[in-house]
Image (cartoon, rainbow, N blue to C red):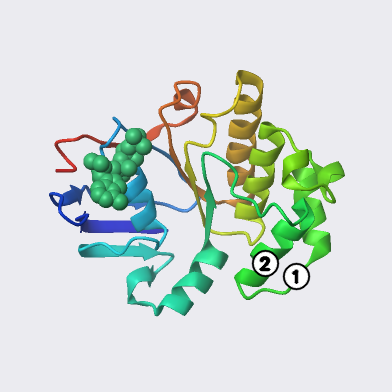
Amino acid sequence: MVDVKAVSYQYAGAESMTFGDLCIGAGEKWLLTGESGSGKSTFLHILTGILKPASGKVTIDGTDIYSLSSAAQDRFRGRNIGIVFQQAHLIKSLTIQENLLLAQSFAGLPKNKKKVNQMLQELGIGSKAFSYPQQLSQGQLQRASIGRALINRPGLLVADEPTSSLDNRNADTVLRLLLDLSNSHNTSLLVSTHDDRVKPAFSNVYNLTLNDAR
Ligand SMILES: Nc1ncnc2c1ncn2[C@@H]1O[C@H](COP(=O)(O)OP(=O)(O)OP(=O)(O)O)[C@@H](O)[C@H]1O
């Protein structure tokens, strides 16, 4: 499903970082760990087609993402990769339902309210479809952003510190939803975290160290 080979990246004026190879099978659940500054966010950005590596290859579901034009890459990302950030990045002027519908049209797919409403029900926030992001709690917002990431049934879901801003109860709900939805949709999962509450749920770990990434 995901194959990362001989990838390196260099920020302007900084030393080059090299990343170990990674192969994630369909439906596998991986944790991305490493101390602050070891390159976790950089790696996730490379994996999701946001930062082009200086060298190496990133293949997702058989497609070399950096061989695509930027418009094709945007469409590919919209359909095949779901991204959940530490803070939900929802559009404030749109309702929760509209935010998910927009994710469908960004990916070049037809808007489908039935699918959106089903997804919101699955996440336990069906009653919030017509609410705006500022009317939701942090935990509900994070569930909505999982819904936006999964609405197009991507093969890969990447989450960058998805629980770190949540209390124990909400962190547990969000983690369970990520794992349950990944199981039921056979979605590969890569979760970056410092959060010790998350670690026991994963058996595959891709660890970055400052030495590796330098
Ligand atoms: N835009 C940038 N320009 C220059 N250097 C950067 C930039 N973004 C990150 N870096 C550097 O690249 C290295 C890796 O950063 P990155 O944010 O990927 O690490 P991280 O493991 O996600 O850290 P944290 O856990 O603190 O979020 C760090 O040394 C950082 O200072």
Q: Can see residue 206?
A: no
- Identity, as a three-letter code, of the amino acid under mark 1: Lys
For label 1, the residue is 111
Which x, y percent locates residue 118?
A: 80, 52
Q: Nearer the viewer, residue 118 or 16?
A: 16
Q: Mark 2 and 1 residues: CB-CB less than 8 Å, in contact? A: yes
Bin the neighbour count of mark 2 within 10 Å (Cα to Cα): few under 14, some 14-19, many 20 and up.
Answer: many
Q: Which of marks 1 and 2 precedes in the sequence?
A: 2
- Identity, as a three-letter code, of the amino acid under mark 2: Gln
Identified at 34% across, 60% down, the residue is: 51
Whether residue 182 sits left or right of residue 68 in the image: it is right
For label 2, the residue is 104
Identified at 14% across, 43% down, the residue is: 214
Q: Quadrant of ligand 1?
A: top left
Q: Quadrant of residue 151?
A: bottom right
Which x, y percent locates residue 83?
A: 52, 52
Q: Nearer the viewer, residue 39 or 177?
A: 39
Q: CA distance from mark 2 to mark 1?
A: 6 Å
Identified at 14% across, 36% down, the residue is: 211
Above or below, comparing residue 162 to residue 108 in the picture = above
Judging from the image, what secondary structure is the residue with disc 1 in? loop
